[in-house]
Image (cartoon, rainbow, N blue to C red):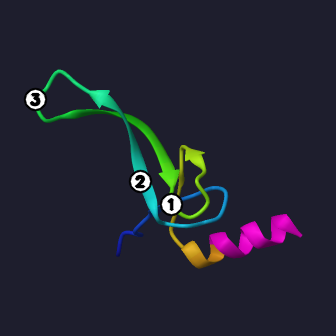
Amino acid sequence: MRKKKFVKVCVSCGSTRLEMLLLGYGLVPFGNEVSGLYTCRECKWSGNPVEVANVKEFKKMLEKKKD
């Protein structure tokens, strides 16, 4: 049985072009503290993304919600 691969997507536009937000420099040299939050490069939304198995279906669902 194959495992499903989940992808993080923006909850606003469905894009997978996410960038992790950094809080600043941590105690570890050359290490940054990670907030767990992401920014979408497409729509500039910031927050916690959702993980989906099918990006196309998620985008269709977002389009239906907009109508």
Q: Label 2 vs label 3: CA separation?
A: 22 Å
Residue type, mark 3 in image? Pro
User: Which circle's residue, 2 or 1, is located before the other in the chain?
Assistant: 2
User: Which circle's residue, 3 or 1, is located before the other in the chain?
Assistant: 3
Is residue 32 positioned above or below 14 on the image? above
Residue, disc 3? 29
Q: Which mark is residue 31?
A: none
* Whether residue 63 can be seen here: yes
Q: Which mark is residue 41?
A: 1
Q: Tell me whether the residue at label 2 lies in contact with that at label 1, contact meaning CB atoms closer than 8 angstroms.
A: yes
Q: Label 3 vs label 1: CA separation?
A: 28 Å
User: Which circle's residue, 2 or 3, is located before the other in the chain?
Assistant: 2
In the image as oriented, which residue stretches furthest toward the right?
67
Q: Is residue 35 left or right of residue 50?
A: left
Q: Tell me whether the residue at label 3 lies in contact with that at label 1, contact meaning CB atoms closer than 8 angstroms.
A: no
Q: Residues within 10 Å of mark 2 (few under 14, many from 20)?
A: few
Report the magenta residues as a range. Answer: 58-67
* Whether residue 1 can be seen here: no
User: Dot 1: what SS?
Assistant: loop
User: Dot 3: what SS?
Assistant: loop
Identify the residue shown where x is 18% and y is 34%.
31
Seen from the viewer's position, the closer of residues 15 and 7 is 15
Identify the residue shown where x is 41% and y is 53%.
19
- In the image, residue 56 lies at what x, y percent? 60, 78
In the image as oriented, which residue stretches furthest toward the top?
27
Q: Main secondary structure of the magenta part?
A: helix
In the image as oriented, which residue stretches furthest toward the left?
29
Q: Is residue 5 magenta?
A: no
Residue, disc 2? 19
